[in-house]
Amino acid sequence: MLRPQGAMREGALNALKNLGADYVRYVPWFPYPKLAVAELKAPEKTTSWDFSLIDPMTIDFLEATKGHPVIINFSTIPQWMFKTNQPVTYPDDPNQVGWGYGGGTQLRDTTMKELTGYYVRLISWYTKGGFTDELGKYHKSGYHYQIPYWEVLNEPDLEHNMSPQTYTKIYDAMVTAIRGVLPRAKFVGMALAYVKPGWFEYFLNPANHKPGIPIDVISYHCYANANSRQKFDAYEYSVFDKAESFVNAVNYIENIRKHLAPNTKTDINELGTFVSDEMRNHPITPAYWNLSASVYAYFFIELSKAGIDIIGESQLVGFPTQFPDVSMINYQNNKPNARYWVLKLIKDNFTPGSKMVKTFLDDNNGDDILAQAFVTQGVKKVLLLNKRNRAINVKLPADFKGAKVSTIDMKSGDNEAAVATINGEETEMKAFAVKVITLGN
């Protein structure tokens, strides 16, 4: 859908550019081998280097995020680099999903020169104007983009069933090689699908790396999912419960990080929600997008409290057959949905350097409403979210009268936050609503 003729391309790129976010992550993924792998066949008498299908999307991304640091991760290792009983095939049609392309647990070249050589050439294509292939032929691109952050692989605990020991060896080899092309780049490690303490204990220990290998940033993921065959009426409890469980795990991992690598930053760069199988096979109810947006606001508050450096929402584009439930673009009308607008609302209001302030709520709301006050560049602001699929009135202090309130709820739909003024002693939080109240300027 992000290809030149893709229906969602224009809307997605405009949304990405207008967001103006730092540390946006770009990951061409294995289910579309022709769109993710630049050398689909092993070099023999000739090579198969081909960027013709990869460049349009990659250049679109780099242009749409110009002026902002980005994280690049061509996570898909060419399948021919792995030992397999027989060659792994892939669809001739680049738009057709090929779930069988991923996997493989043992590299055929244990020195990893084959692996690192591929990535050095790929990076050189985008940053050095071209590269010389394995047979001595030069391939010219003319591109000289900056890549400030490079993330090493994606979900290796799933995609290649790696142990932390194997991954750490690959990370060290790739960092060593890539630094020759990108001497000023920083590196993001792990990108784990699940919170596995053993991985963090091993990877974050400098003693397990070669001398001089940086551990600049670690990354991992969370999708707060509905239970199998669960109806939407119950999502509000299961999804928020799982989000809370993840936050508890993050605090545990932070203790490990602070002990072993206190200067390493953390990027939780895939945060989202999943529907149940029951819903995935049917049209997704519109209220789901507001629930998912509210969950991201919850993550933003709780992970900010935990001191997480980068809090990334997944993902810009999803559509039927390709995780439609995590899309930030409505694949029916190509407009940004509530998940996008909540991210933009948060990003625009709570800039780096904002201070979190102790916040109290009326006990009558229990834990159905979450509120967090901030001071941003001297301005007092409050982020509120409703965890429940019903309207709830929140009592406000007297000095909130006249404050600006920006609201994203089911009424705002696929539009940016509706702006109004606080006139009474309460504000109504509609089902799964997210609000920012700004006092003063």
Image: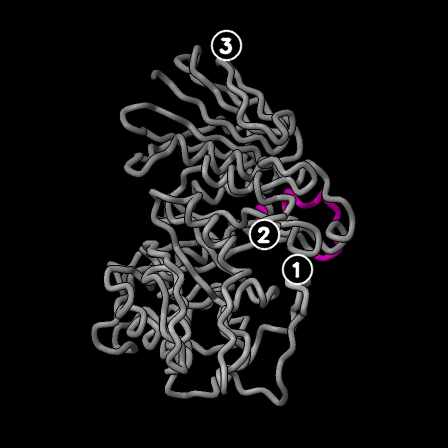
> Which x, y percent locates residue 180?
26, 70
The amino acid type, in three-letter code, at marker 1 is Asn
- Which of 62 and 85 lies nearest the eye of the viewer? 62
- Which of 96 and 326 lies nearest the eye of the viewer? 96
Element class at badge 2:
loop
Res 326 seen here: no
Q: Are marks 3 and 2 in contact (CB under 8 Å)?
A: no
Q: CA distance from mark 3 to mark 2?
A: 47 Å
Give the mark nearer the N terminus: 3 vs 2: 2
The amino acid type, in three-letter code, at marker 2 is Arg
> Which x, y percent locates residue 56?
51, 53
- The quadrant where residue 211 appears: bottom left
Whether 140 is drawn above or below 145: the answer is below
Circle 2 packing at 10 Å, graded few (<14), some (14-19), many (20+), is some
Query: Residue beneath label 2, please?
Result: 3
Q: CA distance from mark 2 to mark 1?
A: 9 Å
Query: Magenta residues?
Result: 228-241
Whether 359 is drawn above or below 245: the answer is above
